[in-house]
Amino acid sequence: MATGATPRHVLAASSRRSSRAVTIAIGGFNTLLLFFVHGALTSAATPEIIRETFHLYYQPLIPFLVMLWGWGLNVLYFERTGLRYDACFDADADHGHGHGHGRSGSALLSGAELLRLANVLTLALFSSAVVFLRFVGQGNVWAAAMQPVALYLAAVLVLFLPLDVFYRDSRRYFAGTLWRVVTPVRSVRWADFLLADILTSLAKGISDVERAVCSMASGPIFSESTHSLCTEISWAIPLAIALPYSWRFFQCWRVYRETGNKSQLSNAAKYMTAFPVIFLSYAKYHVSTDQWVLLWKPLWLVACFLNSTFSYYWDVERDWEIGWFSVMRKRRTPFVKPILPQPTQIADRTYFYLMASNLVLRYVLESAGWVGARSRSLACSLTRCRISTGCRGAIN
């Protein structure tokens, strides 16, 4: 090494400190933007139509950002505890399902990279929101209307940008996996199953995005008559909510046809129980109030109960591998202590908290009418990936 040259490890440490400083600065700026948006929306001087329009276009993207932040925190936790979750994705390549550019795990982002990505995307969302509100305040309706359009178009363009920037390999891997999910006509990989499962949790967000895009495509964004074309009476909204559940249904059926695993038929039936909830919710806007109260609402409540109960049972007994309902059947009493999977990869009390919160949120959100809302924990979804026994068991 030449005299006076800076050691490589010193440069790397300096780069990490610089990256951390930029991340903190963006996070601080995001906080300021959030306060500005909150203040503008809660101001008495802001017309109601502005609040409604803002929520129509910007609220649908928030669940996706929250999911990205949550996934980044989960990956960071996996890295710090030594849990090799990436082996699940590498198993796809081992079984001949790679993308042709090396092992699929090579396209995965680290926890720090995911959090930086979430930070930048949050900045993009809040910046667009602030510009939207500023133009509205100045009376420049046309410029304000262009902000959500530009934001949605930019999200699509960045995902498919062919240049070797902004995590190109990861973007390609995600886009390829998304394509496999929405066209479930091939063997199911771990990544396909995981993304489709996440999308069922985001079903309500997907329908909100559809409603926003519908509104943008149908005319001026501040026209109330335009919004009426994309309200709850539209058939496209329940269809958008149902799509993620149909993708998982066909994935389960595909795995059953390939492996003969009959438990996949039960898994498919679980997703089928979501369809009556979705379409009975849609019926509310096409029947009279008396018909809804006397006939359709009781049917809807029964459908909600069946879907929530079946899904909760599957989460606990199958996804999280916690012996609770099976122990109840064996001992013929509901007063039993759940048997946790061994070895446990998180604290016992965390399992119990997740079981309780899952149960409460499922029934509360369903009864409140949030069709498709789920309290799925990504961390627990992944703890059933036993590295020693392979990841194929998660979908087989």
Image: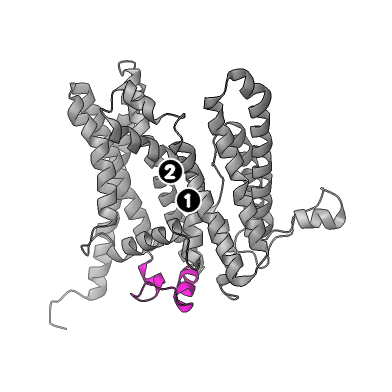
The reply to whether the magenta stretch includes residue 100 is yes
Disc 2/disc 1 C-alpha distance (Å): 8 Å
Residue bounds of the magenta highlight: 86-107
Q: Position of residue 41 (x, y in %)?
A: 34, 25
Tell me the tag on residue 206: 2
The reply to whether the magenta stretch includes residue 52 is no
Q: Secondary structure at mark 1?
A: helix
Q: How busy is the neighbourhood of tag 1: few (under 14 within 10 Å), some, or many (20 plus)?
A: many
Q: Position of residue 233 (x, y in %)?
A: 46, 29
Q: Secondary structure at mark 2?
A: helix
Q: Amino acid at mark 2?
A: Ile
Residue 342, picture quadrant = bottom right
Q: Is residue 379 visible?
A: no
Looking at the figure, which quarter contains the N terminus?
bottom left
Reading the image, the residue beneath label 1 is: 199
Q: Position of residue 287 (x, y in %)?
A: 57, 24
User: What residue appears at the point 68 percent right and 42 percent down from the top-left corner?
Assistant: 306
User: What residue appears at the point 61 percent right and 49 percent down from the top-left corner?
Assistant: 272
